């Protein structure tokens, strides 16, 4: 009987009655927050701090979900609530159908074994070899020496560093350390893997390799992955769903491609700007004016998605008979969908610009009028 | 130097090593858990017990601030209770242990506090019990610091052990006082000092060697 089964068996009967109705209750959730608030009490003259409020969301089983926010937005509190290191002030936090916020002692420690975690600074023991680091959670869970040896060998293979078995962390690169961190997090076969800024200390190439590894793990083991990060590029590369938090609130959530093309909150837009690199070319930006210019063009940014996005300029030109100029563009694949940011120039004064904007909004594109150029 | 005198030096060295060895062993077996507790019982820590922590802290400081020679005299009744006598090397172990325990505890506390708090958090998130965290994370990670602490304690004990000579404790200090000072034998005094220097040097070298060997933060190739 594995840890997961023993957890199920120890659940009291009433847990199987239908859960209370809520927005979050509809999906088959691996992690679910219901009306969670977290306030840290006043301490040594510092006032109390409300880190999270009105948090309601569900992370679907088997998904890779990004939780993105600036530092201080409440990400760390969120992580510590999921792995049971802290209790919510109000509300409930469910992991794998079980309210982790009411557990304590032995029950909590058992539940924590079904939650793996990887860290920004790897948090490996310097006194242990790679293999011994991976063995740590298994020792804690009371596995036998033989079982541990077999499992550790499997895990070293899984993360592709079998040759580093006897190396100490000080002898390894950042990417190798994070691979050990991942192997260690997966050791007890958790159902959910929390990644707390796991790639923030790595260079872009290593980041890509680690994210690819996480994608493989999600695909092959079906482990639900929660990516906590401040980098939209990480979310873009890996996640299908994203939750945007700001100042302790969930301000936006949904499919990554939807959030990318229809960002509602300013904070989301700034995250997007970082990743799409959709700042205008310098030569264009310096010529941009606020007032219309006779004989000039209106500059409009269009966020496009799906297959319809690729042809939007062509259709505009054909259907409205306006020679739309493409000033800058970037098209990318996000959450399995083609997503892009186009900057177009529309000649023919405000009337033509209004016509174009109307056409775009009719076809569900997000637009923004940036200004005018001569 | 006559063979008898050389014999005296050898015998006194043996007594000193015996006192220091036993005192270090006993003081470590009390000081290590005490130091771990001091390092983990603050507010919000593993074994959070801020009141007990504060009381123990005061007790440790009080013992440490009592001059050793006064401690030796002050606890004579207790020494007699434990050792049956207050004279000789065996009896000297009692005050040596009592002086070294809080010293070691503070050094252990400092070494444990050096361990990255992120590692405690990591082990907690795996569902480790506080005891597992102490045994599998804190002590192994602090091992280089702990070995240096023990080395420092043994060196200090060698100094203290020379002091108990003044109250009939035996060992090298006793020899130095009785022969070197009271019988005015500068050669004997010099010999005692040289042996002490050699002992301290040896202990420090051995301690440094092992501390470095277990320090995996350094690269070993």
Image (cartoon, coloured by chain):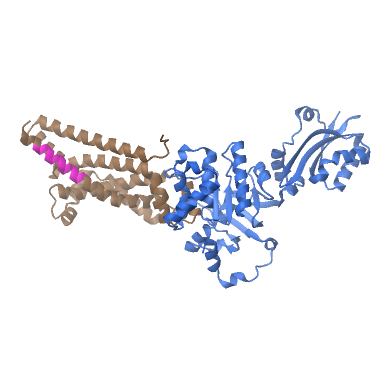
| Along the line of sight, the residue nearer the viewer: B14 or A77 | B14
What color does chain B have in the rendering?
Answer: brown
Residue pictured at 83% horizontal, 48% vertical: A364
Up/down of A20 relative to B138, above or below: below
The answer to whether residue A303 is left or right of residue A97 is: right
| Along the line of sight, the residue nearer the viewer: A142 or B15 | A142
| Along the line of sight, the residue nearer the viewer: B108 or B62 | B108
Query: Residue lying furthest right in this view?
Result: A321
Q: Main secondary structure of the magenta part?
A: helix
Question: Is residue B19 highlighted in magenta?
Answer: yes
Q: Is residue A290 visible?
A: no
Residue pictured at 72% horizontal, 47% vertical: A336
Q: Find residue A143 and report its image quarter.
A: bottom left
Question: Is residue A178 highlighted in magenta?
Answer: no
Residue bounds of the magenta highlight? B7-20
Percent position of residue A9, x then y: 54, 68
Residue pictured at 38% horizontal, 48% vertical: B139
The answer to whether residue B208 is left or right of residue A158 is: left
């Amino acid at each position: 009987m594995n840890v997961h089964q023993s957890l199920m068996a120890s659940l009291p009967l009433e847990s199987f009655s239908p859960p209370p109705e809520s927005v979050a209750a509809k999906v088959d959730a691996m992690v679910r927050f219901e009306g969670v608030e977290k306030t840290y009490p006043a301490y040594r003259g510092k006032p109390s701090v409300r880190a999270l409020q009105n948090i309601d969301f569900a992370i679907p089983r088997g998904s890779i979900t990004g939780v993105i926010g600036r530092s201080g937005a409440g990400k760390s509190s969120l992580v510590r609530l999921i792995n049971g290191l802290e209790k919510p002030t109000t509300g409930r936090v469910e992991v794998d159908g079980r309210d982790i916020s009411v557990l304590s002692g032995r029950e909590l420690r058992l539940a924590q074994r079904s939650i793996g975690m990887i860290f920004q600074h790897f948090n490996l023991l310097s006194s242990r070899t790679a293999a011994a680091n991976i063995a740590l959670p298994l020792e804690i869970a009371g596995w036998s020496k033989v079982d541990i040896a077999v499992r550790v060998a499997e895990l070293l293979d899984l993360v592709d560093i079998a040759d580093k078995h006897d190396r100490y962390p000080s002898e390894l690169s950042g990417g190798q350390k994070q691979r050990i961190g991942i192997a260690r997090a997966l050791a007890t076969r958790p159902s959910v893997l929390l990644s707390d800024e796991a790639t923030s200390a790595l260079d872009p190439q290593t980041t890509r390799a680690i994210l690819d590894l996480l994608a493989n793990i999600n695909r092959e083991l079906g482990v639900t992955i929660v990516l906590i990060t401040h980098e939209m590029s990480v979310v873009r590369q890996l996640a299908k769903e994203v939750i945007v938090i700001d100042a302790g609130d969930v301000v936006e959530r949904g499919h990554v491609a939807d959030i990318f093309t229809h960002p509602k909150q300013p904070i989301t837009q700034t995250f997007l700007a970082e990743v799409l690199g959709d700042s205008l070319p310098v030569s264009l930006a310096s010529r941009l004016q606020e007032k219309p210019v006779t004989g000039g063009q209106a500059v409009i940014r269009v966020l496009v998605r799906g297959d319809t996005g690729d042809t939007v300029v062509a259709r505009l030109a054909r259907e409205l008979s306006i020679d739309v100029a493409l000033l800058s563009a970037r098209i990318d694949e996000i959450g399995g969908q083609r997503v892009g940011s186009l900057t177009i120039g529309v000649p023919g004064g405000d009337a033509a610009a209004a016509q174009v904007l109307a056409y775009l909004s009719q076809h569900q594109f997000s637009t923004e009028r940036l200004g005018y150029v001569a | 130097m006559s063979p008898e005198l050389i014999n005296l030096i050898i015998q006194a060295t043996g007594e000193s090593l015996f006192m220091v060895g036993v005192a270090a062993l006993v003081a470590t077996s009390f000081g290590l858990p005490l130091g771990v507790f001091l390092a983990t019982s603050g507010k919000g820590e593993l074994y959070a017990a801020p009141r007990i922590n504060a009381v123990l802290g005061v007790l440790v400081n009080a013992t440490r601030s009592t001059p050793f020679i006064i401690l030796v005299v002050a606890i004579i009744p207790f020494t007699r209770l434990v050792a049956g006598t207050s004279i000789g090397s065996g009896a000297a172990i009692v005050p040596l242990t009592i002086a070294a325990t809080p010293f070691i505890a503070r050094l252990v506390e400092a070494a444990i506090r050096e361990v990255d708090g992120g590692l405690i958090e990591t082990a907690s998130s795996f569902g480790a019990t506080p005891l597992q965290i102490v045994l599998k994370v804190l002590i192994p990670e602090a091992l280089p610091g702990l070995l240096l602490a023990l080395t420092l304690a043994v060196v200090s004990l060698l100094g203290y052990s020379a002091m108990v000579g003044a109250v009939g404790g035996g060992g090298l200090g006793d020899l130095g006082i009785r022969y070197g000072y009271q019988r005015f034998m500068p050669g004997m005094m010099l010999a005692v000092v040289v042996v002490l220097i050699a002992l301290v040097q040896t202990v420090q070298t051995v301690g440094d060697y092992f501390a470095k060997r277990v320090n995996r933060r350094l690269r070993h190739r």
